[in-house]
Amino acid sequence: MVSDITSSSARIWTRSELSNSVSICLIDGEGNSFRHCSIYTPVERDHTGYVQITNLPPDTRYTYSVGGELSDDWWFKTRPASDQVCRIAFGSCANEKAGSSEVWNRIDEDNATAVVLLGDTPYIDTTDLSVQRKRYREFASVPAFSSLVSHVPLYATWDDHDFGRNDTDGNLKGKENSRKAFGEYRPNPSIGERGEGIYTSFTQGPVEVFLLDTRWFAGTEFEDEKPTLLGAQQWEWLSRSLKASTSPYKILACGMIFNNAVRPLKRDYWGAYPHEYDRLLHLINETNTTGIILVSGDIHWSRVIQHDTEDKIGYDLHEFITSPIHEKLIPLANAPHPGIVYTGGLLNS
């Protein structure tokens, strides 16, 4: 996999069958090998590892070899010095079947500059470390997916099924195993802070994407007897990061939907934490952050929702719900909401 590609660096991830030192070699447009790196893949990381290659020129295409092997899919291009255009694909809820592969192929055909997975990618439903790792390996072994992420940078957060159990929160036993496996198989720019959570951010073109973790801290802290969703540590990071951001567009992305229109009996969504949603609006207003766009997944139905927030932050937020990547639609997720701009579930015939 490739990840965290900037105008001067790129991250390359790999997995081997045994603890090993895997050679990575960059090859320029003239066919010359000019950078040789090694990735150590210890058993403690399930034989996974990555290398961050730095001091590369901008807007330059490279191929790379892994362990002396080459593939037409193994290439990347550094971002331009004046980075003004991007084409980021967001999605959630995927499996190893043909329907998801069609989507991976379509993303590749559409020349995406990044792929962002918003959770349930893969479905795991346990915190058993051996099963967690096995499911990530199976998901990564799908040819269409492995081809895509070998040249389109991958970024990710999780939702309930890859965190460990349907509809769960941060009180789930064994969540440390889920975090360990995620860190082994998702080479994000960073993974939370101080050993907790997996939140991170990255910038591409005029966009900064903030990948929120709505599982690790959920229900583990209370303020005025109300349960947290993001947790104090993540709220502090988000406040600090929004204040520091210079991108004209800021995407807040997570698995959970931000609105309160859900199917009956569903309990994992921002609307179940109304005080946290209000806190988000307060933060946006307090930091005078413009250009916020919401992106979410989970519900197996695609929608665009306009949030009536102009009186609170000066403009209406728009939420893009991108789910699912597989074929399992849930029509009950097409719940009424006054701000519906688009709602639909599409299947290829």
Image: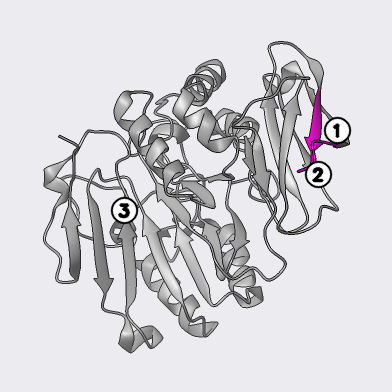
Question: 246 or 256, which is in the foreground?
Answer: 246
Residue 144, how many percent across, how many down? 45, 29
The answer to whether residue 206 is left or right of residue 275 is right
Q: Mark 3 highlights which residue?
A: 269
Residue type, mark 2 in image: Ile
Mark 2, other Cα within 10 Å: few <14 / some 14–19 / many ≥20: some
Q: Mark 1 highlights which residue?
A: 37
Relative to 19, does residue 158 appear above or below in the rendering?
below
Residue 301, how many percent across, how many down? 22, 47
Mark 3 → mark 1, Cα distance in angstroms:
43 Å
**Magenta residues?**
23-32
Relative to 215, does residue 275 appear above or below in the rendering?
below
Relative to 126, does residue 204 appear above or below in the rendering?
below
First in sequence: mark 1 or mark 2? 1
Q: Do the residues labelled 1 and 2 touch (CB within 8 Å)?
A: yes
Say whether residue 29 is magenta.
yes
Residue type, mark 1 in image: Cys
Residue 85, how many percent across, how many down? 55, 67
- Tell us which disc is closer to us: 3 or 1: 1
Say whether residue 82 is magenta.
no
